[in-house]
Image: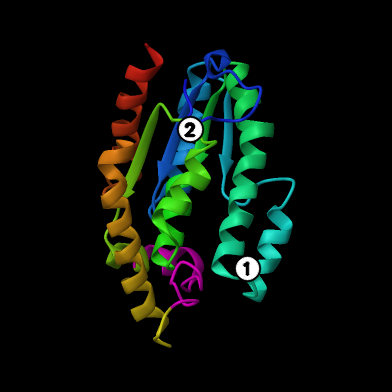
């Protein structure tokens, strides 16, 4: 494995013998379902699996959740909060698991963090330096490409409402959450399209059945596991 940048101090990437697999996509894109299906499939084939994701750090996840409820932080402070959450998981969960030969499945990674912040006016170069300095390069990144109209339907089916943050209401000039959601998701999707070539995403048509999507992912992962 290798880092995008210098990486964490005293960590030799060549010691990381596991695999890092990332699933990216908006809320309602089916990430959670695919995480579950892939975990079951990998464990069924004898692989040890560790799941990670956003806001799961033991260090700051609870405080980050409270800050989001209050909507009291500046964009830069928010970025640093999420970066701390990521760095803590990287050091204490991801790297130890990879050293032990586990497969780490990440429910979103630095790409979502960058895309969200850029849409909110963050400086692209500053954000890339912030995350790429320490982040590991995954073995593969799946991006579940789902149309905003599908996302609306799935979010209503799952939660009976649209999420404040996933609708971009904190930066929206509209009080209509549906209108805000559609505009925000289109902007985030555009950022992922811009990152696609740089980070070599494998784009998956997420408008299909979960089973069809999972089979596509399994075929790609099988190739990685043979290397």
**Residue placed under numbered mark 2 in the picture:** 5
Q: Using the image as rendered, state which of residue 41 and residue 167 is in the foreground.
A: 167
Residue 62 horizontal/vertical position (percent): 73, 57
Q: Is residue 207 visible?
A: no
Looking at the rendered structure, the secondary structure element under dot 1 is helix
Residue 114 horizontal/vertical position (percent): 44, 53
**Residue lying furthest top:** 227
Estimate how packed mark 2 is, as few (under 14), some (14 to 19) or many (20 or more) residues with alpha carbons within 10 Å: some
* Residue drawn at the location 50% of the way across and 67% of the way down: 159
On the picture, is 116 further left or further right than 49?
Answer: left
The disc placed on residue 225 is: none
How many tags in the picture? 2
Q: Is residue 86 visible?
A: yes
Q: Using the image as rendered, state which of residue 196 and residue 225 is in the foreground.
A: 196
Q: Of the residues tagged 1 and 2, which is closer to the observer?
A: 2
Residue 216 horizontal/vertical position (percent): 28, 33
Above or below: residue 89 compared with residue 164: above
Looking at the rendered structure, the secondary structure element under dot 2 is loop
- Majority secondary structure in the magenta region: loop
For the residues bearing labels 1 and 2, Cβ distance under 8 angstroms: no
Q: Using the image as rendered, state which of residue 40 and residue 24 is in the foreground.
A: 24
**Residue placed under numbered mark 1 in the picture:** 68
Q: Reply yes or no: does residue 165 show up in magenta.
A: yes
Q: CA distance from mark 1 to mark 2?
A: 29 Å
* Residue drawn at the location 64% of the way across and 48% of the way down: 85
Q: How is the image coloured?
A: rainbow
In the rendered image, which quarter is residue 183 located in?
bottom left
Q: Reply yes or no: does residue 60 show up in magenta.
A: no
In the rendered image, which quarter is residue 124 located in?
bottom left
The stretch in magenta equals 153-171
């Amino acid at each position: 494995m290798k880092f995008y940048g210098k990486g964490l101090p005293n960590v030799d990437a060549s010691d990381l013998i596991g695999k890092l697999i990332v699933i990216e996509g908006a809320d309602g894109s089916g990430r959670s379902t695919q995480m579950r299906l892939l975990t079951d499939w990998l464990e069924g084939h004898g692989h040890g699996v560790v799941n990670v994701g956003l806001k799961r750090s033991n260090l700051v996840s609870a405080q980050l959740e409270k800050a989001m409820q209050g909507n009291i932080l500046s964009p830069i402070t928010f970025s640093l909060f999420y970066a701390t959450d990521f760095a803590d998981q990287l050091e204490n969960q991801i790297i130890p698991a990879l050293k032990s030969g586990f497969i780490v499945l990440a429910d979103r990674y630095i790409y979502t963090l960058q895309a969200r912040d850029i849409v909110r006016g963050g400086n692209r170069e500053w954000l890339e330096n912030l995350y790429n300095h320490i982040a590991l390069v995954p073995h593969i990144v799946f991006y579940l490409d789902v149309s905003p109209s599908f996302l609306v339907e799935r979010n209503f089916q799952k939660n009976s409402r649209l999420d404040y943050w996933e609708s971009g209401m904190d930066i929206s000039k509209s009080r209509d959450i549906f209108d805000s959601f559609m505009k925000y998701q289109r902007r985030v999707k555009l950022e992922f399209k811009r990152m696609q070539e740089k980070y070599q995403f494998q784009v998956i048509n997420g408008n299909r059945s979960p089973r069809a999507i999972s089979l596509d992912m399994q075929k790609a992962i099988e190739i990685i596991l043979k290397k």
